[in-house]
Amino acid sequence: MFQRVALIGHVGQEPQMRFTADGTPVTNISVATKETASKTSPRGERPCPNGWKESYNGKNWEVTTWWRVTCWRGLAETVNQYVTKGQQIFVEGTVSGTAENGSVNPRVWTGNDGQARASFELTARTIKFLGGRGEGAVGAPIGEAPPEGFEEDALPF
């Protein structure tokens, strides 16, 4: 089974680069994607969908989804050097499963405020810089997959 995900979103934090025991660079970033829906329908005002909030302009409902993105080797180095918080990027990769049967589920945890939180985890194959917060860029090289049989739990972070 092969799955591929493509997203366009904004980087939520500065890249965090680490190295595996054998010296392979690994960089993590968080990416926020936003979905919007109009507050009005042909019949009038729409109720707010569960978990959504009013947009800044007051015309739409919106929800933000957070993705934890892991980059390996050359792509990890490029992302660490050129990606900054707030920048808009395109990411293509595969979603990591968290269930025992390998199905794709979000990583769930409790935030500092006591609220349940969730994020999806993506191993990047390609990242392109779309701009935002400064200058735009044209694109990054295609990344490399983690070594076969590598377990992310072995990372020192």
Image (cartoon, rainbow, N blue to C red):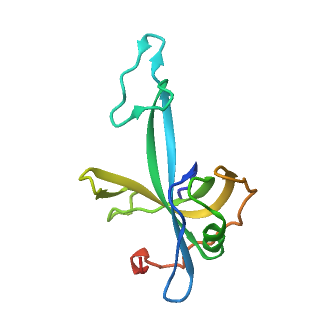
Q: Position of residue 58 (x, y in %)?
A: 47, 25
Camera-side residue: 85 or 22?
85
Q: Position of residue 38 (x, y in %)?
A: 49, 24
Q: Identify whether 41 is placed above or below 98.
A: above
Q: Residue at horizontal 50%, vertical 33%? A: 36
Horizontal arrangement in the rendering, residue 62 relative to residue 85 (left or right): left
Q: Position of residue 68 (x, y in %)?
A: 47, 60
Corner quadrant of residue 124:
bottom right
In this view, the residue farthest toward the left is 114
In this view, the residue farthest toward the top is 43
Camera-side residue: 90 or 101?
90
In this view, the residue farthest toward the right is 138
Q: Residue at horizontal 60%, vertical 72%? A: 76
Q: Total marks drawn?
A: 0
Q: Residue at horizontal 36%, vertical 27%? A: 48
Q: Identify whether 138 is placed above or below 44.
A: below
Camera-side residue: 138 or 12?
12
Horizontal arrangement in the rendering, residue 141 relative to residue 107 (left or right): right
Q: Identify whether 143 is placed above or below 47.
A: below
Corner quadrant of residue 111:
bottom left
Q: Identify whether 21 is placed above or below 93.
A: below
Q: Quadrant of the C terminus?
A: bottom left
Camera-side residue: 122 or 55?
55
In this view, the residue farthest toward the front is 134
Q: Position of residue 147 (x, y in %)?
A: 54, 79
